[in-house]
Amino acid sequence: MGTVKGAELKMAEKRNEINNKELKENLANNAVNMLKEGEDYGELTGTTVDFGYLFEIEDHGLEALFKMTTDRMTCYFAAQKDSLIRIDTNEETFAGITKKFLEIHDVN
């Protein structure tokens, strides 16, 4: 096994942004635009958003997992770097991924 001379391993700086209201609202608004009226929701009144985690990671960008509960269903979303995608998962998997991510990033 070889060695790398002069190289330093450095942990990426990360910021827990779970209390960043503006960022959360921006993500939630973008997620709403991905929903289909009549299928994913009847009306948006009472819709809730719950974040599993929300981090900004140096040289990587955003990492987030959240769910949006409408009058018809719960929809799950993941954000990575500059992308937001809707993911097909369930509550058990959402909770498990959230728990593991927070453990890895040493968040209580």
Image: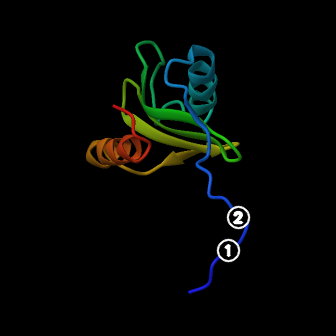
- Tell me where residue 51 appears, x and y as whole percent: 44, 29
Residue drawn at point x = 63 percent, y = 78 percent: 3
- Tell me where residue 82 appears, x and y as whole percent: 70, 42
Check disc 1 and give the amino acid type: Val
Left or right: 84, with 51 as reference point:
right
- Mark 2 burial class by Cα count in 10 Å: few <14, some 14-19, many 20+: few
> Can residue 66 be seen from the camera position used here?
yes
Q: Judging from the image, what secondary structure is the residue with disc 2 in? A: loop
Check disc 2 and give the amino acid type: Ala
Left or right: 88, with 56 as reference point:
left
Dot 1 and dot 2 residues touching (CB under 8 Å): yes
Q: Quadrant of residue 69?
A: top left
Q: Nearer the viewer, residue 79 or 41?
A: 79
Residue drawn at point x = 41 percent, y = 45 percent: 101
Q: CA distance from mark 1 to mark 2?
A: 6 Å
- Tell me where residue 57 appears, x and y as whole percent: 62, 40
The image shows residue 59, relative to residue 44, as above or below, that is below
Left or right: 15, with 89 as reference point:
right
- Mark 1 burial class by Cα count in 10 Å: few <14, some 14-19, many 20+: few
Q: Nearer the viewer, residue 42 or 93?
A: 93
Q: Residue furthest left?
A: 92
Q: Can you tell which mark lies on residue 4?
A: 1
Q: Nearer the viewer, residue 100 or 95?
A: 100
Give the labeled residue for mark 2.
7
Q: Nearer the viewer, residue 14 or 37?
A: 14
Q: Judging from the image, what secondary structure is the residue with disc 1 in? A: loop
Q: Quadrant of the N terminus?
A: bottom right
